[in-house]
Image: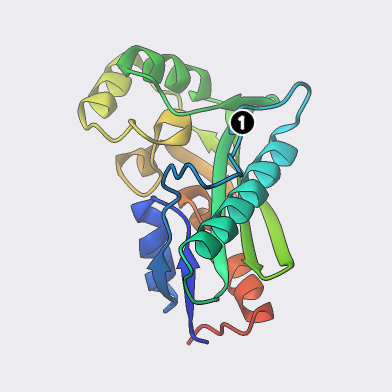
């Protein structure tokens, strides 16, 4: 067994797995009327960001296991992940449009926020999850700089309205934690999880 399933649509997670030499097949969670498990990605009442991200990650793993069973695919470890940006306990999602992205970037400007990524590996009855928190301090972003960034198109589809692996790297004054976790998959922790399932990185 030297391949895993990646249950994620994120191209960034695919690239990160390739970076550490992990071979994988995509397992996308299509809407299947036979599938009984739906992932509730709305935060529950009084659910903290770290509890929320771990819950969603585990529910994705359960849904992926059921999808594997329904499609009668070979057994192999399944990797799922979820990332949120949070500031003062508030979960900052993906922007709906440029106006929403502007609002988010103004909120992050000049301050410190956290990026929390959960990664889970599941096989048969066993599911193991790790949660990694990274603290990031942004430079002050004036309105012109925010407008230029939005014009790049990078803000869309990303938690917190930015991608650290792109132009927004120039916003980061200080980072404490896992850079790859901010991109979408904490590689050290992911490698450790996979090793516990018999998948060893080169």
**Mark 1 neighbour density, 10 Å: few (under 14) some (14–19) many (20 or more):** many
Q: Is residue 177 visible?
A: no
Element under disc 1: strand
Q: Quadrant of residue 49?
A: top right
* Residue drawn 61% across the image and 31% down it: 86
> Mark 1 sits on what residue?
86
Q: In front: 182, or 197? A: 197
Q: Tell me: 26 left or right of 121.
A: left
Residue drawn 55% across the image and 64% down it: 69
Task: Work out whether 63 lies above or below 53.
Answer: below
Q: Nearer the viewer, residue 47 or 74?
A: 74
Q: Position of residue 166 (x, y in %)?
A: 31, 45
Which residue is located at x 47 percent, y 31 percent? Answer: 160
Asked which quadrant contains residue 77, the reply is: bottom right
Tag count:
1
Asked which colour scheme the image uses, the reply is: rainbow
The reply, left or right, for residue 47 in relation to residue 14 is right
Q: Is residue 109 left or right of residue 125?
A: left
Residue 61, how many percent across, how many down? 61, 55
Q: Nearer the viewer, residue 44 or 125?
A: 125
Q: Position of residue 121 (x, y in %)?
A: 62, 65
Residue 164: x, y in percent?
41, 44
């Amino acid at each position: 067994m030297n391949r895993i399933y990646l249950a994620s649509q994120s191209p960034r997670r695919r690239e990160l797995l390739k970076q550490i030499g992990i071979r994988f097949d995509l397992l996308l969670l299509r809407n299947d009327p036979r599938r009984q498990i739906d992932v509730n990605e709305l935060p529950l009442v009084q659910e903290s960001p770290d509890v929320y991200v771990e819950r969603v990650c585990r529910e994705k793993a359960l849904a992926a296991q059921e999808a594997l069973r329904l499609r009668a695919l070979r057994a192999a470890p399944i990797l799922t992940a979820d990332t949120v940006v949070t500031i003062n306990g508030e979960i900052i999602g993906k922007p709906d449009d440029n106006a929403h992205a502007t609002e988010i970037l103004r909120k992050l400007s000049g301050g410190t926020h956290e990026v929390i990524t959960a990664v889970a590996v599941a096989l048969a009855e066993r599911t193991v999850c790790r949660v990694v928190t990274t603290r990031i301090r942004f430079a002050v972003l004036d309105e012109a700089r925010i407008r230029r960034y939005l014009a790049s198109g990078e803000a869309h589809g990303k938690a917190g309205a930015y991608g650290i692996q792109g132009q927004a790297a120039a916003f980061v004054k200080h980072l404490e934690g896992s850079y790859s976790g901010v991109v979408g998959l904490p590689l050290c922790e992911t490698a450790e999880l996979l090793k516990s399932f018999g998948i060893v990185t080169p």
